[in-house]
């Protein structure tokens, strides 16, 4: 942590000196939302410091009422500190001894109560952050299952997770990250399951973040945590579903929950964590396995279908007579690889446009793209029909990828393979695919092999990747996270 936290200003017994601190350091009196409420209790000035909009006014009014009534019943000013402390009717009251912590608490939405003549402040948690209620995430919908999802409020998010893990060994370690933002970040894990070394590593990485602010919350934390650089493949998994986060914690993973973010970070993760979806576990084992295989085929198609088709289109001698239909049946003056790149990038245009287009106009935009641009581009000879077909299938495969980040990374891999095939044809495809696999092999997420359990090969774990096994048959936790307690359930005798 920063050395600036070592030098802190003690709370002055002269409460008006404390007012001056808030005026100098937090612009109290200039910023309209930062204020102070002053009352008199047993001839002692008592000040409430607060931020409008982050506090529940009803709680503050009740606390103020309980303190004002002290004047009607108590007669000993010497015990004002103990009396005030006992009248702070709230379940979370904490003593503070320095003004820096007081200021951070106030700016975080809590109130701080100070008494003239006392060198201690009382922090009371009356936060009520503006935000939405839990609702089903758009990117992780299920046919059957829970409809609640994380929100931008860290308190709600921890409660949603706690509701699913009612275990006293569930640990929530809260810390503030960012010298100016003071973002609340929670490290969550189950104490007797998670690997202590993993917890220590993640905690150390979070505490070592030295930056002024984290307005992008979880994404900035991820970049500090794993130092991904320009590697396009996701090294952590995001989820907005508390049931998914709880399931990973039961396996031994560590969860990072950040305030202002509706998604949590799951660490560590492999490639195969990003290709599984909660829907597979909301259906029977057979249906879940079928769904998983269809998804694997879609992901494979999103990477290799276009390069394979281009390879056969450029060198028809690779096909026997029964497969000659795979190549283009019409010609165009534009090279095939250029057509593919134009069509593929055009789909990205549509994807980006759909993000910025109001819902009421998205249908019209889709009709324009499909009926006008696509068909007319074929009619004028810009594209051959086969290009549109295979580009569309590859795009659908990307959309079928559960992880948005992995879908984009696979698209980059696909475009790279297309360039290799355009330059070197069949040898380019073989070499490009080999380099793609080798690149994935060398990636590690928090010292976790990215292609585990395929490489290094673990037969039992890989079988659970291929087949959605019934829950009663999953007796041990995955070994990749080194859980302290590997047994999930005992077999019935």
Image (spheres, rainbow, N blue to C red):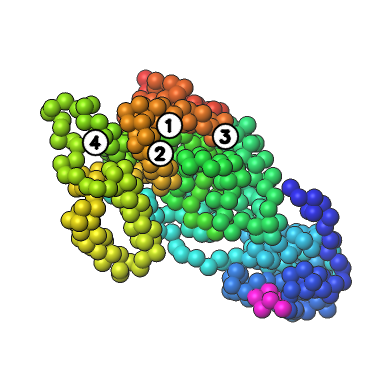
Q: CA distance from mark 2 to mark 1?
A: 9 Å
The residue tagged 1 is: 436
In the picture of the structure, the residue carrying the numbered disc 2 is 416
Residue 32 among those drawn in magenta? yes
Q: CA distance from mark 2 to mark 4?
A: 17 Å
Single out the mark in the foreground, 1 or 4: 4
Q: CA distance from mark 3 to mark 4?
A: 42 Å
Picture residue at 34% right of the left edge, 34% below the top:
421
Q: Residue 432: where, in percent of width, then height?
A: 40, 31
Residue 201: quarter of image:
top right
Q: Which mark is residue 446?
A: 3
- Quadrant, the C terminus: top left
Q: Position of residue 282 (x, y in %)?
A: 31, 42
The structure residue drawn at horizontal position 24% and vertical position 45%, both measured from the top left corner, is: 387
Q: Secondary structure at mark 1?
A: helix
Which residue is pictured at 59% across the width and 59% down the height?
Answer: 215
Dot 3 falls on a residue whose secondary structure is loop
First reached walking from the N terminus: tag 3 or tag 4: 4
- The residue pinned by badge 4 equals 313
> Depth-wise, is mark 3 or mark 1 nearer the camera?
1
Residue at 63 percent across and 50 percent down: it is 174
- Alpha-carbon span between mark 3 and mark 1: 21 Å
């Amino acid at each position: 942590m920063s050395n600036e936290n070592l030098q802190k200003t003690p709370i002055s017994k002269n409460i008006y000196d404390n007012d001056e601190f808030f005026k100098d350091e937090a612009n109290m009196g200039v910023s309209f939302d930062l204020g102070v409420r002053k009352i008199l209790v047993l001839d002692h000035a008592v000040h409430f410091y607060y931020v409008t909009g982050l506090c529940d006014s009803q709680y503050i009014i009740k606390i103020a009422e309980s303190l004002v009534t002290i004047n009607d019943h108590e007669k000993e000013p010497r015990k004002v500190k103990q009396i005030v402390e006992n009248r702070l009717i709230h379940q979370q009251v904490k003593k503070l001894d320095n003004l820096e912590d007081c200021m951070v608490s106030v700016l975080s939405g809590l109130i701080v109560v100070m008494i003239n003549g006392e060198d201690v402040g009382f922090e009371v948690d009356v936060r009520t952050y503006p935000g939405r209620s839990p609702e089903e995430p758009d990117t992780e919908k299920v046919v059957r299952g829970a409809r609640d999802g994380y929100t931008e409020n860290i308190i709600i998010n921890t409660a949603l997770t706690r509701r699913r893990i009612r275990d006293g060994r569930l640990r929530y370690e809260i810390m503030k990250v960012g010298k100016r933002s003071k973002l609340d970040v929670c490290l969550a894990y189950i104490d007797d399951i998670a690997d202590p070394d993993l917890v220590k590593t993640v905690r150390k990485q979070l505490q070592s973040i030295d930056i002024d602010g984290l307005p992008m919350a979880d994404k900035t934390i991820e970049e500090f945590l794993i130092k991904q650089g320009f590697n396009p493949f996701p090294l952590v998994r995001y989820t907005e579903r508390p049931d998914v986060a709880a399931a990973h914690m039961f396996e031994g993973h560590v969860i990072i929950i950040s305030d202002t973010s509706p998604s949590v970070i799951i660490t560590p993760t492999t490639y195969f964590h990003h290709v599984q979806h909660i829907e597979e576990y909301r259906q029977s084992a057979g249906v879940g396995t079928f769904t998983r295989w269809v998804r694997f085929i879609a992901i494979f198609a999103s990477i290799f279908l276009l390069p394979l088709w281009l390879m056969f289109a450029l060198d028809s001698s690779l096909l026997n007579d029964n497969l000659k239909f795979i190549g283009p049946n019409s010609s165009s003056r534009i090279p095939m690889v250029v057509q593919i790149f134009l069509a593929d990038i055009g789909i990205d245009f549509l994807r980006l446009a759909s993000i910025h287009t109001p819902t009421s106009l998205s249908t019209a935009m889709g009709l324009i793209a499909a009926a006008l641009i696509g068909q007319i581009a074929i009619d004028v000879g810009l594209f051959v029909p086969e290009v549109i077909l295979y580009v569309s299938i590859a795009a659908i495969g990307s959309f079928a990828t559960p992880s948005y980040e992995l879908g984009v990374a696979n698209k980059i891999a696909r475009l790279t393979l297309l360039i290799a095939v355009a330059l070197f044809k069949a040898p380019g495809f073989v070499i490009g695919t080999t380099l793609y696999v080798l690149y994935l092999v060398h990636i590690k997420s928090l010292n976790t092999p990215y292609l585990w359990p395929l490489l290094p090969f673990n037969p039992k774990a890989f079988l659970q990747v291929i087949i959605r096994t019934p829950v009663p048959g999953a007796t041990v936790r995955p070994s990749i996270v080194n859980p302290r307690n590997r047994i999930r359930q005992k077999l019935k005798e």
